[in-house]
Image (cartoon, rainbow, N blue to C red):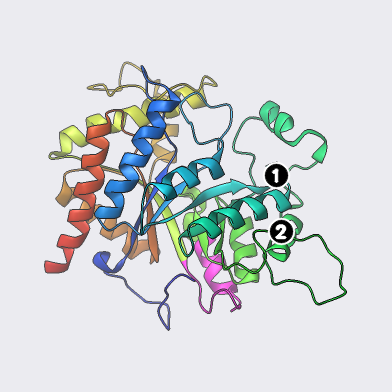
Amino acid sequence: MPEHPTTHPRSRALQDTPLSVLDLAPVVVGATPRDAFRNTLDLARHAEAWGYRRYWLAEHHNMPGIASSATSLLIGHVAAGTTTIRVGAGGIMLPNHAPLVIAEQFGTLESLYPGRIDLGLGRAPGTDPLTARALRRSLGTDGDDFPELVSELRAYLDRAPPPGVARVRAIPGEGLNIPIWLLGSSGYSARMAAHLGLPFAFASHFAPDYLLPALELYRSGFRPSDALERPHAMIGLHVVVADTDEEARRLSTSQQQQFLSLIRGRPGQLPPPVDAMDALWAPHEEATIRRQLRYSVAGSPETVRQRVQAIVDETLADELMVVAQIHDHGARLRSYELLSEAVKGAQAR
């Protein structure tokens, strides 16, 4: 169960806000998924040493620049190569899967790495409509049955049925304490997480418009449950830290270029950074991307510390889930290290 205060704070110090990593296993230009997986494990080991709480991997499909499609397998790879950091899904797109299969997969992971596995659930396909149909085949769902799928999954993870009661059982999985989070980018999952008394993670790193309304819906409608006594909200941020503001802004152009390719309908691998984006995007594309990436932060450690503290003040987030789409792996490692140092250093201010 996530740690939580006895009452929700009116303010939160940055150094008291846990940091976690969201990894899409980016495939950069000139590299392969094999390289992405090697970098993922290397980053996870460093993140563990730097004090990050969780390391989550996201399910996406038919995306040349994202290698985390077989999310459960990659979670096992990371958990096997680390020792203490929590590893999980941010998230599993449940309408793509039979709940029994997910219960068994995460039951297996929790049995192998007890006390370290998180299960974040989303209702979007994590891909384009054509690929969604290929994934779901004859399931005939567009996500509207998400509450029923979550209920079925939670039933499989519940305790064993009484003697004489016949039901399908998830073995392994049954009776294991696997924290379930609901993920979302609108008010839908916020309401559902509140109703069920589950922790909630909002994808503000790419869907900022509904962040504050969704948090309000979640907190105001929260019902205590066996899983969680009080609301616990985590928000996603794209953060790039470098020694200077200029270098961080340059590194962040890789993500901007990737977003540009996505809105043009031509998703690709993560490109190297450029000195300026002016020649690459049209004014309306720039406006769209800057709006979508409103909760992206790039700068020196002090610049980032101030901006992230302002976001924590605005949202009262209980945790921060940080993604850094940086082309060079060494620069990506350095960004997460500098962020950790900046947050820890805030305590002395």
Quarter of the picture containing the C terminus is: bottom left
Where are the magenta residues, as a range?
214-232
Residue at image location 39% in from the left, 24% down from the top: 283
Which is more toward the observer, 289 or 339?
339
Q: Are marks 2 and 1 in contact (CB under 8 Å)?
A: no
Kind of residue indicated by mark 2: Ala
Nearer to us in this view, 147 or 328: 328
Q: Which residue is mark 1?
A: 97
Can you say whether 183 is above or below 73 in the image?
Answer: below
Q: Which residue corresponds to mark 2? A: 170
Q: Nearer the viewer, residue 36 or 16?
A: 36
Secondary structure of the residue carrying tag 1 is loop
Name the element at disc 2: loop
The picture places residue 84, in percent across and down from the top left corner, at 36, 59
Tell me what residue is drawn at x 83 percent, y 64 percent: 167
Residue occupying the far bottom of the picture? 6
